Image (cartoon, coloured by chain):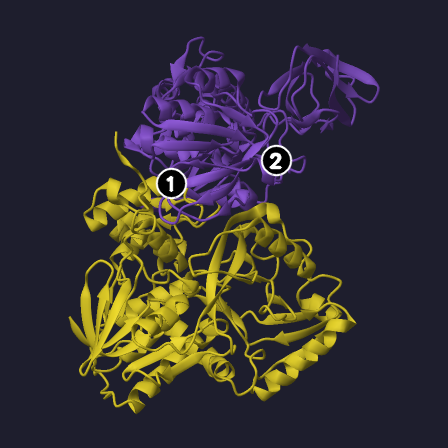
Amino acid sequence: MNYDIIIAGGGVIGGMVARELSKYNLSVCILEKQNDVAMGASKANSGIIHGGYDPEPNTLKAKMNSRGVELLYKAAKELNVPFKQNGSMICAFGKAEESEVHNLYNRGIENNIKEMRIISGDEARKIEPALSDEVSLVLYVPTAGIICPYKLTIAAIGNAMDNGVELIRNFEICNIKKNDSGFIITSTNGQEVSAKYLINCAGCHGDKVAKLAGDGEFEIIPRAGEYLLLDKAEGSTVSHTIFQVPSANGKGILVTPTADGNLLTGPTAAVVESADNNEITPEGIKTVIDLAKRSVPEIQFSKVITSFAGVRSSEKNGDFIIEASKKVEGLVNVAAIDSPGLTSCVAIAEYVTEILKNMGVTLNAKENWVGNRADTEAFNHMTDDEKDAFIKQNPAYGKIVCRCESITEGEIRAAVRQNPKALDMDGVKRRTRSGMGRCQGGFCSPYVMRIIAEENGIKMEDVTKKGGASKMVVGRM
Amino acid sequence: MLKCDIAIIGGGPAGMAAACAAYDAGVKDVIVFDREDEMGGILRQCIHNGFGLHKLGKELTGPEYAAVYANMVKERGIKVYTNTTVLKLSNDKVVTATNTDGILKIKAKAVILAMGCRERSRGALNICGTRPAGIYSAGTAQKLINCEGYMVGKRVVILGSGDIGLIMARRMSLQGAKVEAVCEIMSYSGGLTRNIVQCLEDYNIPLYLSTTVAEIHGRERLEGVTIAEVDANRQPIESTKRYIPCDTLLLSCGLIPENELTTGAGIKIDRITSGAVVDQNRQTEIEGIFACGNVLQVHDLVDYVSDEAEIAGKGAAEYVMGNKTSGEVIVTKAGNGVRYVLPQRIVKNDESVSLFLRVTKPFGKVKFTVKSGDEVLATAIRLKAAPGEMEKLTVKAEKMAFAEKEITVELEEV
């Protein structure tokens, strides 16, 4: 197939770029190497909408972050992705760290961040009682928030698809040929597509894709971050996102409620060999527990329901790379998008579109573009009477499949059918939260397997956890 | 809003026995809610035998044991809502449930909690490494094999020597899988002795004590695990690490009572049992709400679940009929060598009281003593005691008369 534009990578950046481009009369295709979207850093990060005080002034990070916050809140509303503007606190522990709070405040002023203020530890504990007594000074950023990063990615790509963008999964790029009319891209499983323009949103593999296209100007440094996620029963331990003043390794260990109501602690920051190094380590777990307890001593780590690690892509200069390739015509690199990448995603998409325009891409707005996506959680928000009436019309919504999160068969079937379809167990989990609760799929897995098999017309033996060889069972008895 | 005398949440062994006991005690307007298409709970997937020896005097399989009680429920004409999940319980005993007909709300005079328990998941165990397919809690694998008819793997390592893990070691072997090892982080097994003999020894499956799974390997499907012996702090010892190739890891690392509805209603939970705090009738600290079975304390044998459910069923019926127990409240305490004692409270009357407890670690010959102040209320000798086997001690009515404020159960090695 030939397209105007190919986007390499179905993460939150590729997804938001796709959604932005779906506004125009262009043929656009996303190539994703996994069986689902949001499989890299987009599924395993802190889910924070950063206030914008942290990036060095005048960097792309500073610009994208300060522009991105408002754009992201707007997009989340349109896409019906749950978020909460819960505010963040950046904590200093004792005199030695207090100067860093003032530095961040001043940087925030330079970055044009509004409503920030510096408060004492005691003031902070009045609005966040679980905060450690050791916290002496706090930068309070009320505009910061929390959002579910994979739901945002899924919704952005789903909305782009609703507006005509194509998604090809299991397309791992192994070769890119450049000729006068553009790029010819082949995958490890023998598929081939071509396009005039290539937007490289390949996350931790961004340097490899750039090299394949003939541009070897940068190198991605993958950094793994490990997290511990706690039961919803602990979700109200804190109401704000609690940071410690940053170190050279990132924004440090945070403690935050998630948009879905759990408590999240992490991440560590360890440079790893590749994007595939997303293991949980004993050192990582220990670091998260020790440092999270420094901020909030009363966290009940016996209520951890799962641990995970995400690999973020950074670059030696420390800033985002968002530019037309200097070496390869038609290639746009969007790389090294680590924190605050999630916050910046819509602003980055807007900026990329501007770059394409400057490269000569004609942007004719579609007349029938629809920016809203159906609310996949509508049922959950209904009153009991509304639910009763809805179930009478749609009985599958009366059958609870995931007991921990109260997810119904109706919700799961809807999620499997909606763009981008859920093809595997983890895909259903990220879309519906079925299997994401305290039993971690212990009870609902057999039911969800059956639904996936039925909806996709495959055998139970072919249902996978996350595509490829990740089969759930090995055969019929 | 609908009304009933007794609403029972859960139609497993506890719910079924409680329903029959309540009915037989004189309350006929009983409703059982069950989320599955048939009553029976987890027994439906336990197709091995060993059920009913104490209670029914014969050895049955899980589904057979469940059928005995399901028939008793049917014979009594007790109303059962299957395929119905209870979403909420309020402290004034309004049960909100859902099924394919819609949302139903029922105001009950008494409620019996019988929701059972769940298995501890991989995430809660903080096992390091990757997150591939092929890692199941033992009960999930049991359901897939016994109820759905799918084989979960061919080469298996089992972490945890709880009874379900042991049963599944045998089940997987019978089905042609190679069970490489059962690893137990403690220095003793938490399972019943008979299961260690019949499920591991008879099949030459090694049980490694003081050993854990330190790391999980494989990106898509599980490829292997690193096992290691643990030190006194239960941390893996580097020099003992060894790799075992396998495509399946089953987890049998403990059961957790499913008390989300309970806490939602504001009922006090015991930190040790993870179940409600109850009196001798299994009444929680909210009057008219009772609890029994694995939602109250995790049992070893279903027979004892049925026993406990009968106490709760009868207690709920007496409550509905207006025969409320009142009197001095005595608190039970776990003393030396005892992990917990249930019930946690005793409302003093002129009846004997049975105390259920677990010990803290394996012991040889022990003497249990039940005391209130300096008064010895009961003693019992056991040739051995282990955390995996629940103990029952009875304080006779004439001795209960001497109990004041607090009763302590302790043991000494003899």
Which amino acid, by three-letter code, is at mark 1?
Gly
Q: Colour of chain A?
A: yellow
In which quadrant of the rendered view does residue B235 lie?
top right
Residue A130: x and y in percent read 68, 59
Chain that bears disc 2? B
Q: Mark 2–mark 1 contact, CB under 8 Å?
A: no
* Badge number at residue B230: 2
* Number of the front mark, 2 or 1: 2
Dot 1: what SS?
A: loop
Which amino acid, by three-letter code, is at mark 2?
Val
Q: Is residue B160 above or below residue A472?
A: above
Dot 2: what SS?
A: loop
* Badge number at residue B134: 1
Q: Nearest the camera: A269 or A243? A: A269
* Badge number at residue B183: none
- Who comes first in sequence, dot 2 or dot 1? 1
Q: Is residue A359 above or below residue B44?
A: below
Packing grade of label 2 (10 A; few <14, some 14-19, many >=20) is many
Q: Residue at the location (46% across, 27% down)?
A: B164
Residue with the most extreme left position: A1
Instruction: Give the spatial CA distance, label 2 vs label 1.
Output: 24 Å
Q: Is residue B265 above or below residue B138?
A: below
Q: Nearest the camera: B217 or B16? A: B217
Chain that bears disc 1? B
Q: Could you tell me if residue A267 is visible in this image?
A: yes
Q: Nearest the camera: B300 or B310? A: B300
Quarter of the image where the C terminus of chain B is located:
top right
Residue with the most extreme top position: B57
**Chain ID, purple in image:** B
Packing grade of label 1 (10 A; few <14, some 14-19, many >=20) is many
Quarter of the image where the N terminus of chain B is located:
top left
